[in-house]
Image (cartoon, rainbow, N blue to C red):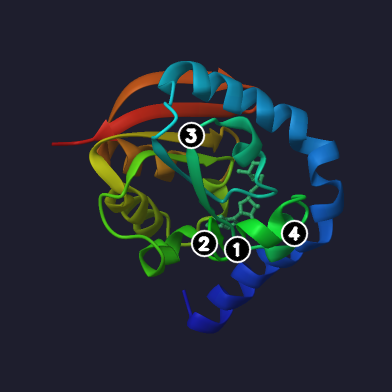
Amino acid sequence: MARKSLKKRKSGVYDYYNAISGSYDELHGKEQIGKLKVIEKVIMPEKNDLLLDVGCGTCLSFDFFKCNVKGVEPSKEMVLKHPKADFLLGKHVFVCGAEDLKKFFGEKSFDFVICVTVAHHFIDAEESFLNMADAGKDDCVFVFSLLKDSGNYGLCVNIINKLFQVFEIREVHRDKLFFCRKKR
Ligand SMILES: C[S@@+](CC[C@H](N)C(=O)[O-])C[C@H]1O[C@@H](n2cnc3c(N)ncnc32)[C@H](O)[C@@H]1O
């Protein structure tokens, strides 16, 4: 894809989330928390574990999980909806997408990497999943929650199966959740 139209597609997504940031939690918060509840039951993170939330939106996961959470989110307006945004930004949450993870986190840093209802926005899905794989420790558990009726659903499933060993699949609302580890 030409660089200019790629940039346009990206900024279209960010403009959209910037615009709906004020009503996001009211419209989608309950549904997204429902997915986090299912994730929590399967992965059971402990207090000292380090979890990365890719596309963390309004940072719902920061109030939900009891472990150390870091996040990336390309729409700053979404992050600013969190009451502790000033504290989180630049320290725990970074304004970037999955394609830029390497700018902020080293390889093999995290015990858990989650990405909830985000992958349908990936412009380069392979690069984004590869970056998430790199950010996880060797025994990291990854959770990818994919919107089932999204245009790149099949592509994402193929990439997940290529890079990861899926050990559990759950369905919540319109998403399918893939729980996996890196292939050895
Ligand atoms: C449906 S929301 C989900 C937000 C959050 N994960 C949740 O469960 O509430 C999709 C989010 O993906 C973010 N996003 C879009 N493109 C992204 C990318 N390339 N990398 C990471 N996040 C992205 C959007 O800005 C938006 O906040």
* Distance (Cα) linking label 4 and label 3: 21 Å
Residue 27 x, y percent position in the rendering: 83, 38
Residue to which mark 3 is pinned: 67
Q: CA distance from mark 1 to mark 4?
A: 12 Å
- In this view, the residue in front, 174 or 98, is 98
Left or right of residue 84: residue 149: left
Distance between the alpha carbons at the discs numbered 1 and 2: 5 Å
Q: Which mark is residue 80?
A: 4
Secondary structure, mark 1, is: loop
Q: Residue at x 36, y 50 (%)?
A: 132
Residue under label 1, please give it.
Answer: 74
Q: Is residue 79 visible?
A: no
Labels 1 and 2 touching (C-beta < 8 A): yes
Q: Left or right of 29: which side holds 54? A: left
Gap in Å between the C-alphas at discs 4 and 2? 16 Å
**Residue receiving disc 2:** 97
Residue at 77%, 36% (x, y): give it: 28
